[in-house]
Image (cartoon, grey):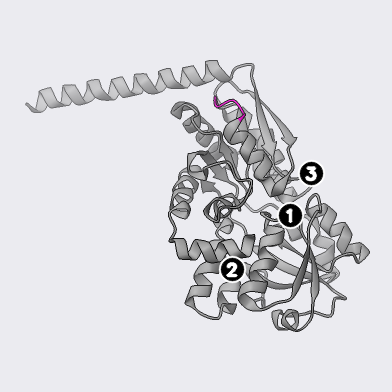
């Protein structure tokens, strides 16, 4: 019996190995000579764009068949336009990869107008790192703390409802009592930065890593003051409180955690729904290999991009959890993002 069981086990292992090799060859045959459209739901130059283009330069080298990855920006509605396209229009064969807004799960949970996707059905691939979201004000705004922002109006720039640049100050207004006046309509983070320099607006949301990468001179010259952060505590952001610490009670804290759930997603990549499982696996494997590629790591270091990969499987599980959150919490969050 032992000998027979061993033989059966060996046969099963060989069969699985053969299937795996056949799948790999099939993936290579599919991708060989093809382009992968890497769609970026925000404007050029921000952190999403940097992460997408950096990953895009290397991930094709680690995919069977070595397809060419072609990045292209598709802006609109804080990333909703691109997500809708990826969900409903783009070919569902593994040739369309999206750099997704990390607010998409929140937008779905809160029934945001314009959402025509189910985040749990995207094939999530991975993220270079989780994010730390911050709210910063221009140095001459007369605001140095959250308490100051409770006492006087501060003009904040944002791309539009649905984007974190809107959601972050809106959440602070609703749950912490600040007085941000949110001006929407900016194409992206760079446009808001220019508006801050011109004095059109006084503040904006941005990730801590993005400030360090794209506006290191502002930090060095103390052009901005960070009021609060959400997400993992940064080692190099001393004396700044987290939104969770500032929450008035447990219910408010839970709502803030929902609204800021995108910090766990970081700057995530996803394929369309219904991509064959072997291609999803190949893309996830290629992403993981990219994160340890010496060339990628060297380029990331030059751009001051920290690498702490979040695997696609975790993002897939998180997306499912978020859309199953209790309705009362979702309704309170909905009032913030509307």
Q: What distance separates the C-alpha of mark 2 from that of mark 3? A: 28 Å
Find residue 70 and report its horizontal and vertical position in percent: 71, 29
Q: Residues within 10 Å of mark 3 (few under 14, many from 20)?
A: some
Asked if the magenta segment contains residue 92, the reply would be yes
Please state which of residues 312 and 235 is positioned toward the viewer in this rendering: 312
In this figure, which residue is indicated by the disc labeled 2?
Answer: 233
Q: What distance separates the C-alpha of mark 1 from that of mark 2? A: 27 Å
Find residue 52 and report its horizontal and vertical position in percent: 68, 41
> Upstream in the sequence, badge 1 or badge 2?
1
Asked if the magenta segment contains residue 79, the reply would be no
Q: Secondary structure at mark 3?
A: loop
Q: What distance separates the C-alpha of mark 1 from that of mark 3? A: 17 Å
| Numbered disc in front, either 1 or 3 | 1
In this figure, which residue is indicated by the disc labeled 1?
Answer: 160
Name the residue at 57% across, 39% down. Answer: 270
Q: Which quarter shows the N terminus?
A: top left
Which contiguous range is marked in magenta? 89-93
Q: Are marks 1 and 2 in contact (CB under 8 Å)?
A: no
In the rendered image, the vertical position of residue 288 relative to residue 328, given as above or below:
above
Find residue 281 and report its horizontal and vertical position in percent: 47, 32
Task: List the single residue furthest toward the left.
Answer: 1
Q: Secondary structure at mark 2?
A: loop
């Amino acid at each position: 019996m032992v000998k027979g069981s061993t033989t059966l086990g060996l046969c099963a292992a060989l069969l699985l190995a053969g299937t795996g090799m056949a799948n790999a060859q099939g993936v290579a045959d599919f991708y060989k000579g093809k382009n992968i459209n890497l769609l970026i739901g925000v404007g050029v130059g921000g952190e999403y764009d940097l992460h997408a283009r950096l990953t895009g330069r290397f991930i094709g080298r680690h995919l069977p068949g070595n397809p060419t990855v072609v990045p292209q920006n598709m802006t609109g509605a804080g990333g909703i336009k691109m997500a809708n396209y990826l969900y409903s229009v783009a070919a569902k064969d593994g040739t369309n990869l999206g750099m997704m807004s990390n607010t998409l799960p929140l937008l779905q949970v809160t029934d945001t107008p314009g959402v025509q996707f189910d985040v749990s059905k995207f094939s999530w691939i991975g993220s270079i790192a989780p994010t730390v979201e911050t709210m910063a004000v221009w140095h001459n705004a007369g605001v140095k703390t959250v308490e100051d922002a409770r006492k006087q109006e501060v003009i904040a720039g944002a791309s539009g409802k649905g984007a974190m640049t809107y959601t972050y100050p809106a959440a602070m207004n609703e749950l912490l009592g600040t007085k941000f006046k949110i001006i929407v309509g900016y194409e992206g983070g760079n446009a808001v930065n220019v508006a801050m320099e011109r004095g059109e607006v006084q503040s904006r949301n941005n990730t801590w890593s993005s400030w360090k990468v794209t506006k290191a001179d502002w930090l060095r010259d103390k052009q901005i003051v960070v009021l609060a952060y959400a997400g993992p505590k940064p080692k190099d952001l001393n004396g700044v409180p987290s939104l969770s610490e500032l929450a008035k009670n447990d219910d408010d804290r839970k709502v803030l955690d929902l609204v800021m759930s995108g910090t766990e997603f970081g700057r995530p990549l996803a394929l369309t729904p219904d991509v064959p499982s072997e291609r999803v696996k190949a893309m996830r494997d290629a992403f993981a290999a990219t994160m340890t590629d010496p060339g990628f790591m060297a380029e990331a270091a030059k751009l001051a991009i920290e690498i702490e990969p979040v695997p696609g499987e975790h993002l897939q599980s998180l997306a499912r959890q978020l859309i199953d959150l209790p309705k009362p919490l979702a309704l309170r969050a909905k009032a913030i993002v509307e």
